[in-house]
Image (tube, rainbow, N blue to C red):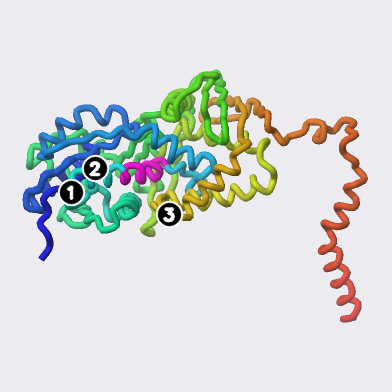
Amino acid sequence: METKIRKIVLAYSGGLDTSIMIPWLRENYGNPEIIAVAANVGQGGELIDLEQRALATGATKYYEVDLREEFARDYIFEGLKLGAKYENVYLLGTAFARPVIAKALVKIATQENADAIAHGCTGKGNDQVRFELGFKAFLPDAKVIAPWREWELKSRDDEIDYAEARGIKLTVSRETNYSKDKNLWHLSHEGLDLENPANAPKLDDILELAVTPENAPDTPTYVTLHFERGVPTALNDKELSPANLIKALNKVGGENGIGIVDMVENRLVGMKSRGVYETPGGAVLYKAAELLRTITLDKETQHFMDHVGIKFGEIVYNGQWFTPLREALSSFAATANENVCGDVKLKLYKGNVEPAGVTSSKSLYSEQIASFDTDDSFTHSDAAGFINLFGLPIKVRAELLEKLEVTER
């Protein structure tokens, strides 16, 4: 006989899904205590009145944990050091946030001696995997409740009907019911007209962090970022914490129409999904770090990092943060970025991030060697021997083909 569920820790956002999950869990699991946990990963105004709303819908306790600096420092910047993206476009905004939230949920579930952890992810999405793999890393035998995999509700309209029948106040309507995820790093939009890739996104209606490039200023904005060991530490000569630096770049990047992505991605569960992502600060940081690496990394490390970044992006996307391979790749990133220090100046203009100068005391770029002017440090005649050796396999093969052609005649 299954043990009675007395206490459930719920990952609570106050959105449509988790708003109705508190009464649903109480109705369907024998009226247990519901502990609502809101993780502050930089969603701003979405946290307003969250405690009152959670308690009003039946939660017995509410926690709000501030994870912003940990999120930026230990998760986002780990990906930044490798230029990690998913499918060469997505800057992993939601994916970076899930492991830090999962870790916090497990901590509270253990502290509260809860019988189960619940989340609001659908059975179609990636986040269910990300959360639950995170739970397993710290609480291997945790019981997980995912109402979307159990309940009779089939759509977001059904959820709204359920909420209205119980007098639950919602922050969305049927007409503006995009599925959104907002944090310090990004804002995603999915659903409604975006589900058909043939539809152009209504950017003027949906954008919140950024303006469209057409509505950006007609004059460029310049920013300078300082990096130490591959991590940004200052913006325009002002030292900032990781979270505050990202927040400041979101503002200036968003004002210039930076970081808007419309993509169809391959979800972990196998289906394709279309979404619009806003990552203004992230787009600026990724470009700056990429430029700095070009002058501070040797060729082989720089090229190998491109491969590692792809793999790291897949690992993060697939929810495998707490794995030996992710830890090993982060160790590589720390070593590879040891000399990635310096300043990067960027020009932000109508959706574009353009180089405006990069300097480093540890630069491997030699103007003397690279110059087309007279240079005593480079002997041009050395190139002939290099080409002969580098081209030896081509020469040998050509001689063989020539010999075979003569024989066949």
Tags 2 and 1 touching, CB below 8 Å: yes
Is 57 covered by the magenta stretch? no
Q: Which mark is residue 114?
A: 1
Q: Which mark is residue 323?
A: 3
Residue at image coords 51%, 46% = 330
The three-letter amino acid code for the residue at tag 1 is: Ala
Task: Please state the horizontal and vertical placement of residue 109, each as a whole percent of the image.
Answer: 22, 46
Above or below, 220 against 367 in this view is: above
Q: Earlier in the sequence, mark 3 or mark 1?
A: 1
Give the extent of the magenta segment.
Answer: 93-103
Tag 2, which secondary structure? helix
| Crowd rating for badge 1 (residues with CA inside 10 Å; few <14, some 14–19, many 20+) | many
Q: Is residue 380 left or right of residue 22?
A: right
Q: Earlier in the sequence, mark 2 or mark 3?
A: 2
Tag 3, which secondary structure? loop
State the CA–CA distance, disc 2 to disc 1: 8 Å
- Outermost residue toward the right? 381
Tag 1, which secondary structure? loop
Q: Earlier in the sequence, mark 2 or mark 1?
A: 2
Q: Is residue 97 left or right of residue 405?
A: left
Q: Is residue 122 left or right of residue 185?
A: left
The three-letter amino acid code for the residue at tag 3 is: Thr
